[in-house]
Image (tube, helix red, strand yellow):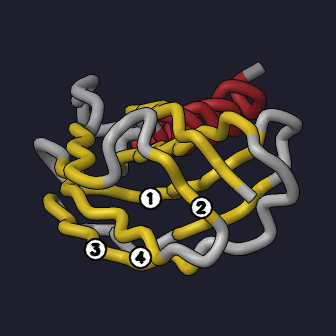
Amino acid sequence: MKNIRTGILPILAVACFFYACSGSSSSDTTPPVIQLDDPDSNDLIINGDTIRFTGTISDNEKLHSMQLTIEGMQGQIYHTYIPTVDGMSTFHFDTPWLVYGIPYDTTGYLNLIVSDQNQNYAYKHWYMRLRD
């Protein structure tokens, strides 16, 4: 019985150490902040135009990722922008999109999702009028 106890105690100690180390050390539950300056919701976007997406994302600690997409009503993706923001606390973006590939007049969506390093997420959704 003594051999079993002496063999289990070191295993339990190591297991407790790994369990304690695997927990998140941060209790941050604040999601990132998204500010889109341009374009405005319901802007008219036409094939051949160059649209600039400008804005700022920030976090009270550190950002992890950002993804901006322009999508059609049927789920088709017309544009994607994924900058490297990992480790930053603030990121200003100003990126152009030469509009092409919109097959017909429709409503589209500008979706912006941002995460921080503590797995908090922010999501914004704007409507856009897409024209062929």
Question: Which residue type does callout 1 highlight?
Answer: Ser
Q: In this view, does 20 lie above or below 115?
A: above
Q: Which label is found at residue 65? A: 1
Describe residue 110's horizontal placement relative to residue 72 as left or right: left
| Badge 4 or badge 2: first in the primary sequence | 2
Question: Which residue type does callout 2 highlight?
Answer: Ile
Secondary structure state at the residue bearing disc 3: strand
Q: Quadrant of residue 55?
A: bottom left
Describe residue 24's horizontal placement relative to residue 60 as left or right: right
Nearer-the-camera pick, 102 or 3: 102
| Badge 1 or badge 2: first in the primary sequence | 2
Q: Label 2, on which residue?
A: 46
The Cα atoms of the two marked residues, 2 and 3, are separated by 19 Å
Q: Are marks 2 and 3 in contact (CB under 8 Å)?
A: no
Q: Between tags 4 and 2, which lies in front?
A: 2
Q: Label 4, on which residue?
A: 84
Picture coordinates of residue 22, whole percent (x, y):
48, 42
Question: Which residue type does callout 3 highlight?
Answer: Asp
Nearer-the-camera pick, 116 or 109: 109
| Badge 1 or badge 4: first in the primary sequence | 1
Picture coordinates of residue 76, whole percent (x, y):
84, 50
Picture coordinates of residue 7, whole percent (x, y):
70, 38
Q: Which label is found at residue 34? A: none
Question: Which residue type does callout 4 highlight?
Answer: Thr
Q: Between tags 1 and 2, which lies in front?
A: 2
| Badge 3 or badge 1: first in the primary sequence | 1
Q: Label 3, on which residue?
A: 94
Circle 2 packing at 10 Å, graded few (<14), some (14-19), many (20+), is: some
